[in-house]
Amino acid sequence: MGNTTFAIIKPDAVKNNYTGKIYNHILDSGFDILCAKLIKMTRAQAEGFYGIHKDKPFFKELTTFMSSGKCMVLALSKESAVSEWRKVIGATNPEEAEDGTIRKLYATSLGENAVHGSDSDENAKIEIAFFFSDIEIIQNK
Ligand code: CMP
């Protein structure tokens, strides 16, 4: 397993002022934050990032939401980072997320579920490269 993953604090969480709480939750869970920045995605960026879902019925809803406001993108480091981060965020649908997980604490619905996490080491690399340059990542390692 790799030691790096990619995370997003999504527009619902930023709008609801949960950015600081989620940032602390990340640190308290033992992750090192390699890189973080607050951005507002264009629709084209959201469509590119979530291209894997382009044929899903929720694609339009998802990309409209992800380009609706500011979000924070982060590269995180920890041993087995992908699976560790997925444990910390909980199930995609907050109604199914375990107590104490970020989605249980801060998400409002399946569509507006507060945070994103890569689902594999391969996708973590692709997703980090989508938002961060090598220089940004390497300087902080
Ligand atoms: P995320 O982990 O960012 O990856 C894809 C996102 O699509 C997922 O979180 C959900 O927010 C969203 N999603 C998945 N299923 C649905 C659905 N049925 N309706 C709306 N959004 C969905």
Image: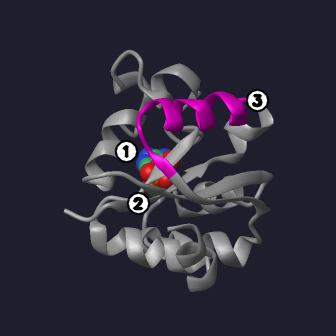
Q: Which mark is residue 31?
A: none
Q: In whole angstroms, how far apart are the C-alphas of marks 2 and 3?
A: 24 Å
Q: Which residue, as the protein is rendered here, is positioned at the far bottom?
A: 134
- Decide: is 104 above or below 6: above
- Decide: is 138 above or below 72: below
Earlier in the chain: of badge 1 and badge 2, it is 2
Q: Is mark 2 within 8 Å of ligand 1?
A: no
Q: Secondary structure at mark 1?
A: helix
Q: Look at the image and tell me in which quarter the N terminus lies.
A: bottom left
Magenta segment main secondary structure: helix
Q: Secondary structure at mark 2?
A: strand
The image position of residue 15, as x and y in percent, is 79, 37
- Decide: is 28 above or below 4: above
Camera sees residue 137: yes
- Decide: is 83 above or below 90: below
Identify residue type, mark 3: Asn
Q: Which residue, as the protein is rendered here, is positioned at the far top?
A: 99
Residue at which label 3 appears: 16
Judge from the rendering whether residue 23 lies leftward or rightward of residue 58; answer left or right. Answer: right
* Residue sitting nearer the eye, 52 or 18: 18
Residue at which label 1 appears: 85
Say if mark 1 contacts mark 2, CB within 8 Å: yes
**Occupied quadrant, residue 42:** bottom right
Q: Is mark 3 within 8 Å of ligand 1?
A: no
Q: In whole angstroms, how far apart are the C-alphas of marks 1 and 2?
A: 8 Å
Q: Is mark 1 within 8 Å of ligand 1?
A: no
Residue at which label 2 appears: 5
Judge from the rendering whether residue 121 lies leftward or rightward of residue 42; answer left or right. Answer: left
